[in-house]
Image (spheres, rainbow, N blue to C red):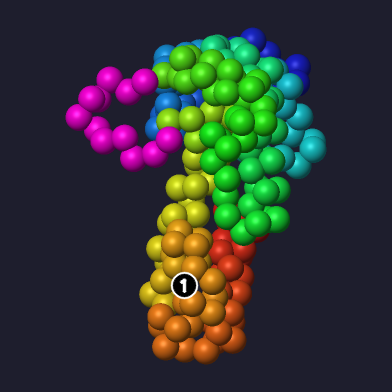
Amino acid sequence: MTGAPSAARELAIRDHVPLVRQIARRVARVATGAEFDDLVGDGSLGLIRAVDTFDPTRGTMFESYARRLILGAMLNGMRRRDPVSERVRRTLRRAEERRFEIAQERGTMPTFVELERDDPALERARLAAYRQATLSLDVSAPLKRDPLADSSLEPGAHVLARAKRAALREAVALLPERERRILSLHYADELSLHSIGSRLAVSPQRVSQLHLTALARLRHTAFVR
């Protein structure tokens, strides 16, 4: 709120502290190791900046403007506190890109171990990321996935990626049962559309139609579009 008097500025900040805490709670739910108080502290700085720079003549609602700056401040704070160096993150991102390139060429996803045979730096980067990773104190929780699977992502990107995955799961749950089944068999079980047709006793062409329909439905959600 450019040029706002001191009293109005302080009131605007106080009135929107609940918004900072709301966003901090959402980020804390998807960001492993993120401290709620740190998020609130960083987000408050974003709120102050929003109040000081908001220009109502641009046609943007203040809350929408403030949300962007608050979230951005929280993500920047997480980046500053990230114990894993950018060089390690970069090495892991490149390896992840290489995995998908190989998967497109041969049809199956290579493991990181395969890539490490040709790239010793990758092994060192994964080890460094593993050592710095925040480990859960809940020892009763089963380990369901590779703890390094998302280690190539910086904290801010990690938060957004997890939020997108959660939104995608919700969107998939709304699909008709047959379309959900086809997506599961194709992407989780890695079956070809022809094999899925045989399993479901329908033609490959029909499976392809249902597959494309399911993807179209997902693209029309707020998350995927």
Range drawn in magenta? 135-146
**Which residue appears at 67% of the width and 27% of the height?**
119
- Majority secondary structure of magenta residues: loop
State the residue in front, 150 or 115. 115
Seen in the picture, residue 27 relative to 198 is either above or below; the reply is: above
State the residue lying farthest toward the right.
58
Q: Position of residue 44 (x, y in %)?
A: 54, 17
Relative image position of residue 141 (x, y in whole percent):
24, 33
Asked whether 139 falls inside the magenta stretch, the response is: yes
Give the camera-side residue of 211 and 101. Answer: 101
- Is residue 62 rendered magenta in the image? no
Question: Residue 200 location in percent, x, y?
Answer: 41, 83
Q: Specify whether 174 is left or right of 93.
A: left
Q: Is residue 113 above or below residue 221?
A: above
Instruction: Residue under label 1, please give it.
Output: 182
Three-letter amino acid code at disc 1? Answer: Ile
Residue 87, percent from left and from top: 68, 17
Query: Is residue 45 in view?
Result: no
State the residue at coordinates (54%, 34%).
113
Above or below: residue 219 compared with residue 96: below
| Residue at image location 70% in from the left, 48% down from the top | 101
Quadrant of the image for the C terminus?
bottom right
Q: Residues within 10 Å of mark 1 (few under 14, many from 20)?
A: many
Secondary structure state at the residue bearing disc 1: helix
